[in-house]
Image (cartoon, helix red, strand yellow):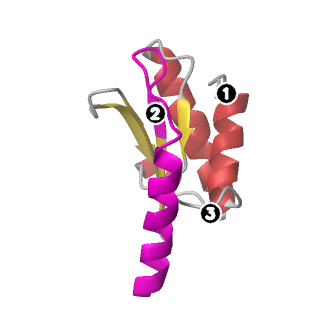
């Protein structure tokens, strides 16, 4: 990936992270998207990971789905894990990535599974 793309994403990330307000009852749902995989984790105020899910998990990785469908599965799975731990409300941190495609699919699936953001 070119250096200018990385700088652009980090600039967006810094701008967006200033508007995200994390509290003890609303942890962050952080999304990272690589060229082939997508990762989601819920992070508390002290930057400790509460739960995580990714498209590299065995049962998701073996599927013959496209990347947008896998992102939706990851979104549903992270919502189920969070609800199992008692987390209902989160703050969505798209981590500098544009809100379309795989990031949007993950967010919508997490909302449908019961997370509020």
- The dot on residue 84 is none
The boundaries of the magenta stretch are 1-29
State the residue in front, 43 or 37. Answer: 43
User: Residue at image x 49%, y 68%?
Assistant: 9
Q: How many numbered marks does the figure carry?
A: 3
Mark 2 — residue?
Answer: 28
Q: Name the residue under label 3.
A: 67
Image point (66%, 64%), residue name: 66
Q: Does the magenta stretch include residue 117?
A: no
Residue at the (59%, 40%) spot, across then down: 75
- In the orientation shown, which residue stands out farthest toward the bottom? 2
- Of the numbered discs 2 and 1, the one sitting upstream in the chain is 2
Secondary structure of the residue carrying tag 3 is helix
Q: Is mark 2 on a helix, strand or loop?
A: strand
Q: Position of residue 103 (x, y in %)?
A: 62, 54
CB-based contact (under 8 Å), mark 2 and mark 1: no
How many residues crowd around disc 1 within 10 Å: few (fewer than 14), some, or many (20 or more)?
Answer: some
Looking at the image, is mark 2 or mark 1 nearer the viewer? 2
Q: Which of 105 and 27 is in front in this view?
A: 27
Q: Name the residue under label 1.
A: 113
Measured Cα–Cα span from mark 2 to mark 3: 23 Å
Q: Which of marks 1 and 3 is nearer the N terminus?
A: 3
């Amino acid at each position: 990936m070119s250096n200018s793309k990385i700088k652009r994403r980090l600039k967006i990330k810094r701008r967006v992270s200033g508007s995200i307000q994390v509290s003890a009852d609303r942890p962050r749902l952080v999304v990272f998207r690589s060229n082939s995989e997508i990762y989601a984790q819920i992070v508390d105020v002290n930057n400790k990971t509460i739960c995580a899910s990714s498209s590299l998990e065995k049962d998701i990785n073996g599927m013959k789905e496209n990347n947008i469908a896998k992102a939706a599965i990851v979104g549903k799975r992270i919502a189920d894990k969070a609800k199992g731990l008692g987390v209902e409300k989160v703050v969505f941190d798209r981590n500098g990535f544009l809100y379309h495609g795989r990031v949007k699919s993950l967010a919508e699936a997490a909302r449908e599974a019961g997370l509020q953001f």
